[in-house]
Amino acid sequence: MSQHPVSHDLAGRIARLEAVEAIKALKHRYLRACDAKDPEGFRACFVTSGASIDFGRLGRFDDADGIVKVFESIALRQVDGENVILDMHHAMHPDITVHDADTASGRWTLKFRQVNLLDNTESVSTGEYDDEYVVEDGRWKMSKCHFRRYWAIVQPIGADWKIDQ
C-alpha cells in the first residue's frame, strides 16, 4: 500500500476516499454545467473568490467570474433562438491527491468535441486539467483550474449533416 500524508487508520482512509469521490462529483458537475450551458452551475464549482484560472487561448483570470463571462459569451450565443456552439466535455483518468481534510489537487484528461454552427466546423481536441481543490462552506470547490490543450482537429461540417437541438 502506498504512503499517503492523510491518516492511515481506517477512519482516515475512508475520509480520503470520500474526499476523492466528492472531488470527482465536483468535476462532473462542472462538465455537465459546461455542456448544459449553465453559467450558475459552472460558477458554483469554483471558490467564492480568488480562483486561479488559466484556459490558454480563452484567457487567464484570478477569479472565476472572468471565465464565467467568457463561458457565457461563447456557450450561450444564439442565432434565431438556436444555440450556435454545441459542446461535449468528457474528463477521464482522474489522478487526485488529498493533502489534508481541506485541500487536494488533481489532474484530468479532457476529451472535447465542439460543433460551431457559425463557422460550420466540428472540432475534436484533448488536453489536461491541472486543478487544486479546497473545502469551502463544507463542500469541495476548485481553487485552481488550468487547462493545457494537447491537440485539435477541425473539419468542416458536411452539407448532409443535420443538427437537431
Image (cartoon, grey):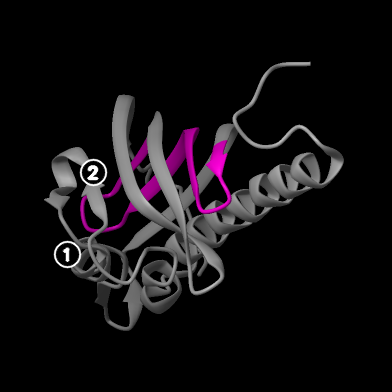
Residue located at (45% from left, 73% from top): 41
Residue 125 in sight here: no
Callout 2 crowding tier (Cα within 10 Å): few <14, some 14–19, many ≥20: some
> Does residue 60 appear to the left or right of 80 in the view shown?
left
Q: Is 30 part of what is drawn in magenta? A: no
Q: Secondary structure at mark 2?
A: loop
> Does residue 139 appear to the left or right of 1 in the view shown?
left
Q: For the magenta stretch, what is the residue range?
A: 98-123
Name, please, the residue furthest toward the bottom: 81
**Residue at numbered disc 2:** 55
**Percent of width and height locating residue 112:** 44, 40
Residue located at (29% from left, 30% from top): 148
Image quarter for residue 56?
top left
Task: Indicate whether 13 appears above or below 51.
Answer: above
User: Which residue type does callout 2 highlight?
Assistant: Phe
User: Which residue type does callout 1 highlight?
Assistant: Gly
**Percent of width and height locating residue 159:** 37, 46
Q: Which mark is residue 66?
A: 1
Residue 49 in sight here: yes
**Percent of width and height locating residue 7:** 70, 37
Q: Nearer the viewer, residue 128 or 150?
A: 128
Q: Nearer the viewer, residue 132 or 107?
A: 132
